[in-house]
Structure formats: structure tokens, C-alpha cells
């Protein structure tokens, strides 16, 4: 059986008999307003995040969430790095997580995710709080971010340390991404295609838009970064399905999936067009 036909078969079987076991869980967290430096509401963001979560639940996974005012720093912070961190019973208690929130302009630490309210002197989740996967007492293999500047191309290696715990794929956006009711179906389709194409290609295929919605001219430029202990392993992990559960390897190499030349049309150095 060809690999493509096998994946078609797996998808059909998944709808008839879910792939998940009782221990498998997915986690999502979406904010629609913030006490921390942002004004205005983004009501569709929760709809986008929920579409992924609900669709994943149809495959038999246990659904966990922490939305709105419950998007707090401690839920994404590892207790091995900060004594008050509880990610091992929240975001990192699931094998796949999706975070929907503003991404502030990144610095040398990479992605800075806006939390609902200030805690421990900061409004942002940053690299010093991140340690995901089995090596840190968690479960995460797939980290998705519906967030601007979450995997900026010049700073993509800032995710490498977070992968040391066993994260297989990091998926986010280079530059600005848009929020719209038009995007809800994309997140539903991404969850479905992650069981047939692979999580990384499903993210890039479904999240790319050559132009934004609601009169915005900038494209959405998704990037997925897969890790392995060799170039061949990283390429294999880039095709990993949600239900495959490939063995962890050391993240010595990374494979990047993206849309060649995608230009988020930003004015910062980390928002230049993606390479050919």
C-alpha cells in the first residue's frame, strides 16, 4: 500500500474508530481580550481555536482548554524553570497544544506571547519559561501557535531549546497573521489533514493565505519546524501524523516547511520575505 493510500485509510478509519487512547489529550488556549497592554476584542480567535479543539475531539482525544481570563503565565511555564510553573498539568499535559493570542515583537528570546494579565512582573510568555515534552515531565509533541511572529524566520532557532524535551513539531507564523471568521474552517481542516498529510504540512497548507481578510493586504506566512537526530529523521518527523506517536530523538537537526517567498509585508527585520 502506498504511503498516500495508507494515510487515506487511516483517516477513514479514524472517523469510524478514533485513533486516540484514553490517555491522549489535546490542549487549547485562546484570548479575546487582555488586561495587559492590548485594547479591543478579537472574538473570532476563540472560534478559530475552538474549531481545531472540537475537530480533534472527534478523533477521540480528550479536550482541555484554558480560555479568556484563564490564559495565565503559570499554565505555560515549566516547574523545573520556575517554582510557580504548572505547565505539566495544563499545556504540557497534552500531546498537542494550540495557543491563540497576540505575539509581541520578538527579541533575542524569540516569541513573546501576550498573557491575559500580568504575573510575576511580566505580561508575556518568553523563552525562559518554556520547557515542553517528556524530558520535563510533560507530554507535548506538537506545539501550534495562532500568533503573530511566533516562528519568525531569523529567530526560528529560539525554539530549539524548547524541543529538547521531545517536542517534534513547532508550528506558527512568520510575521503578522490575521483573525477572521473566514479562518475558522481553516483550523477545522488543519486538524483533519494533520491525520493524513502530517501535522507540519497540514499547518503550512491550510494556514497560508496570499492576502489577508477584512481589507488587510498582508499574507499569512505559516512556518513549521520539525526536529530529529539526523536530517533524515527530521524530514520523517515533518510528515508525522497526529496519531503516529513516533519515538523521540534528540533535536540535533531541524526541517523547515514554509511557502517560498511569502512576504508578510512588515517593516521589521524579522518580517522580511521568506527565502526561496
Image: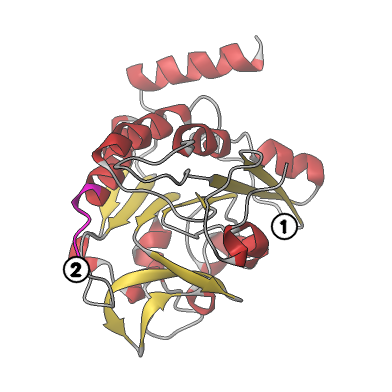
Local SS, label 1: loop
Going by the image, does 252 lie left or right of 69? right
For the magenta stretch, what is the residue range? 40-44
Q: Main secondary structure of the magenta part?
A: loop
Between residues 197 and 96, which one lies in front from this camera angle?
197
Rendered residue at 62%/56% (across/down): 272
Q: Position of residue 223 (x, y in %)?
A: 57, 47
Between residues 122 and 194, which one lies in front from this camera angle?
122
Q: Which residue is mark 2?
A: 69
Residue 62 found in image quarter: top left
Between residues 165 and 221, which one lies in front from this camera angle?
221
Q: For the residues carrying marks 2 and 1, which lies nearer the camera in this image?
A: 2
Q: Is residue 147 above or below residue 169?
A: below
Q: Which residue is mark 1?
A: 250
Rendered residue at 31%/48% (across/down): 179
Graded by Cα atoms within 10 Å as few (under 14), some (14 to 19) or many (20 or more), the crowding at tag 2 reads some
Residue 24 found in image quarter: top left
Q: Looking at this view, name the residue that lies furthest to the bottom.
A: 121
Q: Is residue 96 above or below residue 211?
A: below
Graded by Cα atoms within 10 Å as few (under 14), some (14 to 19) or many (20 or more), the crowding at tag 1 reads some
Q: Position of residue 190 (x, y in %)?
A: 42, 33
Q: Is residue 44 visible?
A: yes
Q: Position of residue 90 (x, y in %)?
A: 34, 63
Q: Position of residue 102 (x, y in %)?
A: 36, 63
Going from the N terminus, do you reach mark 2 or mark 1 first?
2
Local SS, label 2: helix
Amino acid at each position: 500500500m502506498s504511503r498516500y493510500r495508507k494515510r487515506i485509510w487511516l483517516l477513514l478509519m479514524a472517523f469510524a474508530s478514533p485513533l486516540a487512547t484514553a490517555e491522549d489529550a489535546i490542549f487549547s488556549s485562546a484570548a479575546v481580550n487582555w488586561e495587559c497592554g492590548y485594547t479591543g476584542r478579537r472574538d473570532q480567535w476563540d472560534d478559530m481555536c475552538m474549531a481545531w479543539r472540537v475537530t480533534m475531539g472527534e478523533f477521540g482525544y480528550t479536550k482541555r482548554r484554558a480560555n479568556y481570563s484563564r490564559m495565565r503565565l503559570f499554565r505555560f511555564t515549566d516547574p523545573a524553570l520556575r517554582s510557580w510553573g504548572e505547565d505539566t498539568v495544563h499545556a504540557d499535559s497534552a500531546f498537542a497544544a494550540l495557543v491563540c493570542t497576540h505575539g509581541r515583537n520578538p527579541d533575542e528570546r524569540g516569541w513573546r506571547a501576550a498573557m491575559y494579565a500580568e504575573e510575576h512582573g511580566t505580561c508575556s510568555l518568553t523563552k525562559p519559561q518554556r520547557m515542553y515534552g517528556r524530558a520535563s515531565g510533560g507530554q507535548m509533541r506538537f506545539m501550534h501557535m495562532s500568533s503573530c511572529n511566533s516562528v519568525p524566520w531569523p529567530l526560528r532557532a529560539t525554539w530549539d531549546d524548547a524541543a529538547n524535551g521531545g517536542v517534534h513539531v513547532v508550528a506558527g507564523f512568520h510575521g503578522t497573521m490575521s483573525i477572521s471568521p473566514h479562518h475558522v474552517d481553516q483550523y477545522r481542516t488543519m486538524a483533519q489533514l494533520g491525520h493524513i498529510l502530517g501535522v507540519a504540512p497540514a499547518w503550512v497548507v491550510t494556514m497560508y493565505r496570499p492576502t489577508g481578510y477584512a481589507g488587510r493586504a498582508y499574507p499569512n506566512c505559516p512556518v513549521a519546524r520539525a526536529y530529529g537526530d539526523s536530517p533524515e529523521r527530521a524530514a520523517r518527523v515533518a510528515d508525522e501524523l497526529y496519531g503516529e506517536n513516533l519515538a523521540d530523538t534528540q533535536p540535533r537537526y531541524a526541517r523547515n516547511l514554509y511557502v517560498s517567498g511569502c512576504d508578510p509585508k512588515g517593516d521589521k527585520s524579522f518580517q522580511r520575505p521568506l527565502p526561496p
